[in-house]
Image (spheres, rainbow, N blue to C red):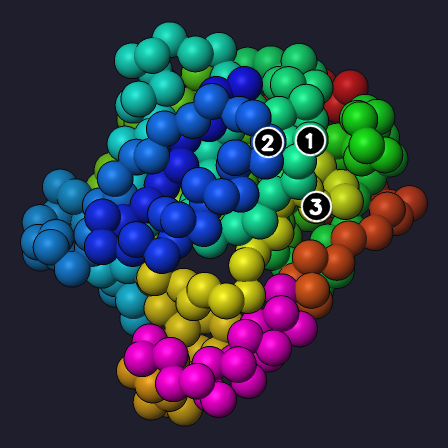
Amino acid sequence: MYAYVINLARSADRRAHITAELKKTGLDYEIVTAVDGRELDLSDAAVVDPSLGSMTAFMPGTAGAALSHLSVYRKIIADRRDAALVLEDDVTVPADLGMLADAVARQLTGAEVALLSYDCADTCKLSREGLVELPSARELALPIDISQPASAGGYIITRQACERMAQCVLPVRVNPDNWCFFYREGALDRVRCVVPLPVLKASKFVSTIGPYSLGNGIRARLVWPLVRRKIPVLHQVLCYRRQHIFRGWARAEFVDMPFIEKPSRIGIG
């Protein structure tokens, strides 16, 4: 399995972090320089859809993140890889990630993505229908509600999915981790989740898109400049807060209930 790691040129601390994380896995990887949203012309409707402004208050970061993942899809296509691992630079990974990624990739077909990291405001509900056992006591499962899991921190994607995503991302209308949107648009044929989560967010880093872990209100926007300065005591408090929030976002459970929206057009198993 080959990994593509997204990292802003100005984020040397994150680059050092993810490089150390990947060293313990033995994976082959390359750093893909992320698109800096601060340098984008957000008025260019061919790149950023005007509707994005009504979806997020952090257009530069959202657009930059979406374009960064798009550049990875194009690299995977150009490199002619059947499937690849995509990672952001603010995550922690297990030592057996390579073996796990290979096992997941063998299960993928068509235009499919398997999430190794995902966030859910509520506990992510998963189905036992079509469940696949993986190494290290993990499983590959379908979400009951495809709109629940969101995160682009770590995922495995097929080349066919990359080809379709490359045609769907522009102009940027949503976050790059809005898998439900891309599924409904036909760019993806199936979305599955790996549980327990092997790729986790590192609490010492704040989002480069916006203050999501602080909330969405005015207070979050006021605190955001202080967060980015990493004032020692405040930084430690917020790291602890983010760790607590991330644990809540990573909850998952198997339930016996019908799919709210079937997350597959290519079969369940």
Q: Could you tell me which residue is drawn at 27 percent across and 49 percent down?
A: 8
Residue type at mark 2: give it.
Answer: Thr
**Mark 1 crowd level (few <14, some 14–19, many ≥20, 10 Å Cα):** some
Image quarter for residue 221? bottom left
Question: Distance from label 3 to label 2 (Cα)?
Answer: 16 Å
Return the mark for residue 245. Answer: none
Residue pictured at 12% horizontal, 52% vertical: 40
Residue pointed to by mark 2: 25
Check contact, mark 3 vs mark 1: CB within 8 A.
no
Q: From mark 2 to mark 1, how far is it between C-alphas?
A: 6 Å
Q: Is residue 38 above or below residue 145?
A: below
Q: Is residue 45 visible?
A: yes
Q: Give the left or right position of residue 7, taking residue 205 as reference.
A: left
Please say whether residue 178 is one of the residues in the magenta stretch: no
Indicate the quadrant containing the N terminus: top left, top right, bottom left or bottom right.
top right
The magenta segment is 228-246
Q: Residue at x 53, y 25 (%)?
A: 27
Answer above or below: position of 161 versus 235: above
What type is the residue that disc 3 sits on?
A: Leu
Magenta stretch mostly in which secondary structure? helix
In the depicted view, which residue is nearer to us: 39 or 264? 39
Residue 12, image x, y percentages: 30, 53
Where is mark 1, residue-wise? 96
Q: Position of residue 4 (x, y in %)?
A: 40, 30
Q: Is residue 142 visible?
A: no
- Mark nearer the N terminus (3 vs 1): 1
Question: Callout 3: helix, strand or loop?
Answer: loop
For disc 3, the marked residue is 197
Q: Position of residue 150 (x, y in %)?
A: 55, 50
Quadrant for the C terminus in the image: top right
